[in-house]
């Protein structure tokens, strides 16, 4: 029995490798690298380091997909997104045509923004999504990080899916292994059978459970030359400029405000952790180097190491906020521009809307730690959105793959 895992980024690899290692002895896991452009060598090098069998796809046409399916002859196809890049729906069509079950393992929280209705509010959301898709394509072209051919194909698919009201998490897969109960409720609410949605948690949370705080702290301090006794505050960014939701001036204001607040704290360093795929590190280095408040800027470092090392984490909308909560660290939503965030005060997060308040909240956290009521609220939120934090999510997903492979037909 074989299972193939579709990846187009390092986070996909990090999510799937633990699952492959938990597969039963009679099930072989093969990773199919879908990125033949900017990230190909990086992904292939990581897979070689992990000693995982892989194949890079020859192209993004139907014949390339069918060639992969014929060569590997999988019992199950595993994918982390179903409507993000043009080859997603193509793999779904080809696998379904051959009767191969598909397991959808979301790489992040399934957002309420994925559901766009035809009422007035839904129409406004539709227009916003359309604008963001067009601006996102334009800014990706300017960044030079992705080939123009891939940008054109992906941008056209985003716009086409907008008109169809069919975005991420709406694909015709067989089963889904989702983070928590909240994601299952969302999928069931749009007509997915409850039997086809399994709550498993996700391997990204297993990394947090299995990591040791002292070892992570020492590793981070050595890597970034941070002295013992210095506190670390983490700033988790997202591709808000690249997708068209923010402009560059807003990003500059946001980052500088965080740098200024942390600079006011004694013996405290700020580490800015970028989105691992869609942002450019040079954009943030320019902001930091041209300011009086230096900070560390990184992108590919393991998030779980940074979370284990920090006193608190700041973000706006990044789904990594859920990992912050799972690590038991205070989460600050620094919302200067009124963006819709999946985290609120009722969930145990601190919501800050003004620069001066950010410094006050950070001082309180470093001085007094996380209050008990916030810990309880965070625990409820984490269970609802990420299930059990027992380090066994990869094993649950691997067992589900083996079960689907043995049945050998689309359910």
Image (tube, rainbow, N blue to C red):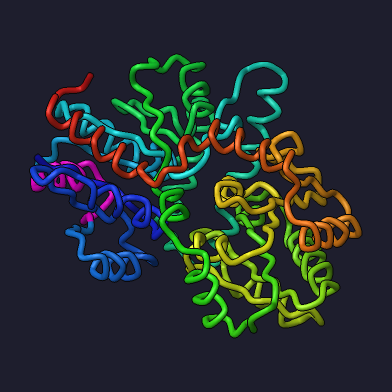
Q: Quadrant of the N terminus?
A: top left
Residue 83 in the image: x percent, y percent? 42, 37
Residue 307 sits in which quadrant? bottom right
Tell me if residue 28 comes above or below residue 196 in the rendering.
below
Residue appearing at x 76%, y 81% in the figure: 290
Q: Nearer the viewer, residue 78 or 205?
A: 205
Q: Indicate yes or no whether the magenta region holds residue 333.
A: no
Image coordinates of residue 67 in percent, x first then y, are 13, 46
Q: Does residue 72 show up? A: yes
Judge from the rendering whether residue 99 lies leftward or rightward of residue 371; answer left or right. left
Find the magenta span and give its range.
57-72
Q: Quadrant of residue 346?
A: top right
Residue 45 is drawn in which quadrant?
bottom left
Counting labels gives: 0
Q: Quadrant of the C terminus?
A: top left
**Pick the front one: 218 or 250:** 218
Look at the image and tell me whether residue 144 can be seen: no
109 relative position to 70: left or right: right
Q: Residue furthest right?
A: 356
Residue at left offset 14%, top offset 29%: 98
């Amino acid at each position: 029995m074989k299972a193939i895992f579709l990846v187009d980024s390092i986070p996909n690899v990090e999510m799937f490798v633990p699952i492959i290692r938990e597969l039963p002895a009679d099930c072989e896991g093969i990773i199919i690298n879908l990125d033949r452009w900017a990230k190909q060598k990086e992904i292939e090098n990581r897979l070689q380091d992990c000693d995982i069998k892989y194949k890079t796809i020859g192209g993004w046409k139907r014949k390339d997909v069918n060639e992969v399916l014929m060569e590997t002859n999988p019992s199950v196809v595993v994918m982390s997104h179903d409507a993000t890049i043009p080859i997603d729906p193509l793999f779904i069509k080809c696998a379904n045509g051959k009767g191969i079950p598909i397991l959808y393992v979301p790489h992040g929280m399934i957002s309420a923004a994925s559901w766009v209705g035809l009422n007035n509010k839904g129409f406004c959301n539709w227009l916003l999504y359309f604008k963001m898709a067009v601006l996102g394509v334009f800014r990706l072209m300017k960044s030079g990080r992705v080939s123009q051919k891939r940008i054109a194909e992906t941008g056209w698919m985003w716009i086409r899916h907008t008109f169809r009201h069919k975005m991420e998490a709406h694909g015709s897969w067989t089963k889904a292994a989702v983070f928590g109960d909240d994601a299952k409720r969302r999928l069931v609410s749009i007509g997915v059978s409850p039997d086809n949605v399994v709550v498993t948690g996700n391997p990204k949370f297993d990394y947090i459970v299995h990591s040791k705080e002292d070892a992570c702290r020492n590793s981070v301090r050595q890597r970034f030359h941070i002295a013992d006794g210095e506190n670390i505050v983490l700033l988790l960014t997202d591709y808000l400029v690249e997708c068209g939701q923010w402009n560059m001036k807003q990003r500059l204001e946001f980052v500088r405000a965080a740098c200024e607040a942390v600079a006011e704290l004694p013996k405290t360093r700020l580490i800015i952790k970028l989105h691992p795929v869609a942002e450019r590190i040079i954009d943030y280095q320019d902001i930091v180097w041209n300011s009086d408040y230096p900070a560390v800027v990184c992108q590919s470092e393991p998030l779980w190491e940074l979370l284990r090392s920090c006193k608190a984490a700041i973000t706006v909308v990044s789904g990594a906020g859920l990992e912050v909560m799972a690590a038991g660290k205070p989460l600050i939503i620094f919302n200067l521009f009124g963006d819709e965030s999946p985290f609120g005060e009722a969930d145990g997060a601190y919501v800050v809307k003004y620069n001066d308040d950010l410094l006050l909240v950070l001082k309180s956290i470093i001085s007094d730690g996380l209050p008990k009521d916030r810990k309880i609220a965070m625990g409820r939120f984490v269970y609802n959105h990420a299930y059990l934090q027992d380090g066994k999510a990869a094993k649950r997903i691997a067992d589900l793959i083996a079960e689907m492979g043995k049945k050998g037909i689309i359910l």
